[in-house]
Image (cartoon, grey):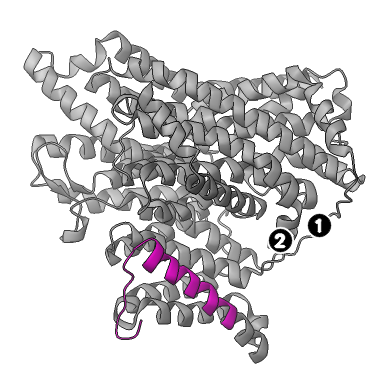
């Protein structure tokens, strides 16, 4: 308890608070820029935290993450283009509100909802993660193997339009993770006689390559970016009225927060799915569903509450099991690793000061979004939306180069980043989502260590491979993996049959 | 051949074909995981290919790749950037390649005045990052023969 308190007090030091304020502004700018996702923003800025104390670095990343997810609402409301995929649903009602001259109200609604959703997610993280970490203590290698496989099957299913392509992406990520020295046995694998690859591919550079470069290249292909921004008229007294209007929808707030947190916990899903699920649920349970899409606050509340609630939710499986809940969490995982922190029970015991400090920093960063978003959000959005692509694209490339170099001061990591970027771009053209690749890359070591150690345990006990199919938790995880693979196929068949029946009926 | 399923399947099969022979001299515990992954990758690629052929979707062109020439130039410039950075110096290389990238990405900047104004701004932006990394964050950036 005292250790946790030490971490919390460190967050309240002026230096860390200032850093988090900077992170909130950076996240807001990144989120407000269409084409720059929260994943990209955090990936580009992870290297900046390298020389900082772990708690400061993680607090900065957490602030950027939370604020970037929120920042996406500005372009959704003001230019009808979601700044991040997490704000797609905000366009549906936020933009009509802005067109009706209620832009200020839409921004206040989005801000308050984001703060409340974010706080709910962080509370869920604070209360659910420690007991889950204790449960994870009871897992052996076979269970960890199945956790990794379950994570991969879910990710492959959710992240890709094609199940097989999602699986192929995940498998490709697993293969990349095997480059270098084998964890048991010490074999050197797939290095093509390059000594620099013996330590494996450097995670941050690879993530920057896979998440950032394909987006920049697509940005260049799309050409000029011209947006027509709706003017926002500032009126006095709107905040109080709107704040009360948001609080007058407790069920919408609660349901969307729960949806966001649960979707965040499911590996691979994240804000891009949560905001749409919450929007649909708000519409389904509304007394006036026909008004959705015409500019009512209910829709904005649902999407913005849910997407920020995914932040805390997504960190639950990451901090306890090492399975990233969302693509941004995959980058946060890399941020933890560069500070020598490995997800699992140890984070809540040996490194409790850093972990609880990090969780508390998310709480503070969420509160910071309120003044920063309301005072600077619109002006910042106006400023950055004028940024020319000829400056923006090379700037991101520059950050990609400097970021991938900074971790180990090794030029080979920069080459790996470029190669991964080209591979990521090719995969994007082939409609293979990069998220399963990245998560395969992260879950690969967990899966391999679980498999090989489990095999050794099986040999020692005389059970061999059967060990993976006899322990109760392993069996549960296996069943969940099979279900997550088979379910999309079954549901697609059901949808097809229903469509056919409707067609025949007509 | 511009069907994403066909190209993705073939690409995965090629990757598997390149990596498989590399496992010849590995021990059991070094090989067990990657071998299983490669087998699964080949199976997934074959299933995708066969399904695409059965559904007669192979002829459906769904890969949209306009301006691939520009992308190739941008990637080549990045490669040049990385290659000469340790030799010429981080800052100088970055400003030079940044300028070239601006010309490639936005042809309207070929107006000399607008180009140099943008480049001056870029030089300041990069200098700030250079100082931030080399002094505040203590990351030693490649100095080369210049800086």
Against A217, residue A26 (above or below) is above
Query: Is residue A139 shown in magenta?
Result: no
Give the residue drawn at x 33%, y 48%. B13
Query: Is residue B124 shown in magenta?
Result: yes
Circle on res. A229: 1
Chain letter for the residue marked with disc 2 in the picture:
A
Give the residue drawn at x 27%, y 17%. A139
Task: Please report the bounds of the magenta region as a residue range.
Answer: B120-147
Sequence-earlier tag: 1 or 2: 1
Q: How many marks?
A: 2
Give the residue drawn at x 61%, y 34%. A308
Q: State which quadrant residue A363 falls in.
A: top right
Q: How crowded is mark 1: few (under 14 residues within 10 Å), some or many (20 or more)?
A: some
Depth order, front residue of A82/A487: A82
Q: Where is residue A498 in the image (x, y as percent from the top left)?
A: 68, 20
Q: Are the residues tagged 1 and 2 within 8 Å (C-beta)? A: yes
Is residue A167 visible in the rendered structure shown here?
A: yes
Q: Position of residue A457 (x, y in %)?
A: 13, 19
Q: State which quadrant residue A66 falls in.
A: top right
Q: Report, in whole angstroms, how far the alpha carbon at label 1 lies from the one at label 2.
A: 9 Å
Q: State which quadrant residue B147 falls in.
A: bottom left
Q: How crowded is mark 2: few (under 14 residues within 10 Å), some or many (20 or more)?
A: many
Q: Name the residue under label 2.
A: A385
């Amino acid at each position: 308890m005292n250790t946790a308190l030490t971490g919390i007090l460190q967050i309240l030091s002026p230096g860390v608070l200032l850093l988090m304020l900077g992170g909130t502004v950076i996240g807001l700018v990144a989120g407000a820029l269409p084409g720059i996702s929260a994943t990209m923003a955090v990936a580009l800025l992870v290297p900046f935290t390298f020389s900082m104390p772990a708690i400061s670095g993680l607090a900065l990343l957490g602030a950027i993450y939370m604020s970037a997810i929120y920042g996406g609402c500005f372009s959704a409301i003001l230019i009808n283009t979601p700044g991040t995929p997490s704000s797609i649903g905000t366009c549906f009602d936020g933009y009509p509100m802005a067109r009706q001259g209620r832009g200020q109200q839409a921004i206040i609604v989005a801000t308050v909802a984001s703060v409340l959703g974010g706080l709910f997610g962080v509370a869920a993280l604070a209360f659910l993660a420690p007991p889950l970490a204790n449960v994870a203590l009871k897992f052996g290698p076979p269970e960890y193997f199945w956790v990794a496989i379950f994570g991969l099957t879910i990710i492959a299913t959710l992240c890709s339009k094609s199940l097989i392509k999602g699986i192929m992406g995940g498998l490709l990520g697993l293969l990349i993770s095997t480059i270098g020295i084998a964890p048991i046995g010490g074999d050197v694998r797939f290095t093509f006689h390059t000594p620099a690859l013996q330590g494996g591919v450097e995670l941050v550079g690879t993530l920057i390559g896979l998440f950032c470069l394909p987006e920049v290249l697509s940005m260049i292909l799309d050409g000029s970016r011209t947006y027509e921004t709706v003017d926002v008229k500032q009126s006095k007294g709107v905040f109080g009225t709107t704040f009360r209007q948001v609080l007058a929808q407790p069920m919408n707030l609660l349901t969307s927060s729960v949806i966001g947190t649960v979707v965040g916990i499911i590996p691979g899903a994240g804000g891009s799915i949560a905001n749409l699920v919450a929007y649909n649920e708000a519409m389904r349970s509304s007394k006036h569903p026909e008004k959705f899409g015409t500019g009512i606050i209910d829709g904005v509340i649902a999407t913005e509450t849910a997407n920020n609630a995914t932040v805390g939710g997504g960190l639950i499986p990451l901090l306890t099991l090492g399975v990233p809940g969302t693509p941004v969490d995959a980058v946060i995982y890399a941020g933890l690793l560069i500070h020598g922190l490995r997800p699992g029970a140890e984070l809540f015991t040996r490194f409790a000061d850093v972990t609880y400090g990090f969780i508390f920093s998310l709480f503070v960063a969420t509160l910071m979004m309120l003044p920063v978003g309301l005072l600077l959000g619109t002006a910042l959005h106006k400023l950055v939306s004028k940024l020319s692509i000829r400056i923006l694209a090379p700037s991101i490339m520059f950050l990609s180069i400097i970021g991938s170099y900074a971790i180990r001061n090794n030029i080979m990591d920069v080459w790996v980043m470029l190669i991964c970027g080209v591979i990521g771009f090719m995969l994007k053209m082939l409609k293979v989502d990069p998220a399963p690749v990245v998560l395969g890359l992260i879950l690969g070591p967990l899966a391999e260590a679980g498999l090989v150690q489990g095999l050794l345990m099986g040999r020692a006990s005389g059970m061999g491979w059967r060990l993976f199919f006899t322990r109760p938790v392993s069996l549960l995880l296996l069943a969940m993996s099979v279900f997550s693979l088979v379910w999309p196929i079954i549901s697609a068949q059901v949808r097809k049959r229903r469509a056919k029946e409707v067609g025949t009926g007509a | 051949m511009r069907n994403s399923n066909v190209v993705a399947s073939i690409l995965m099969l090629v990757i598997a074909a390149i990596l498989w022979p590399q496992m010849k001299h590995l021990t059991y515990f070094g090989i067990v995981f990657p071998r299983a992954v490669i087998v699964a990758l080949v199976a997934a690629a074959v299933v995708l290919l066969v399904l695409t052929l059965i559904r007669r979707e192979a002829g459906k062109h769904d890969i949209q790749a306009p301006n691939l020439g520009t992308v190739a130039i941008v990637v080549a410039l990045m490669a040049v950037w990385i290659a000469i950075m340790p030799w010429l110096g981080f800052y100088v290389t970055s400003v030079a390649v940044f300028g070239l990238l601006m010309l490639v990405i936005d042809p309207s900047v070929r107006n000399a005045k607008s180009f140099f104004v943008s480049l001056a701004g870029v030089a300041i932006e990069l200098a700030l990052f250079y100082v931030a990394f080399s002094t505040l964050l203590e990351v030693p950036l490649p100095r080369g023969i210049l800086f």
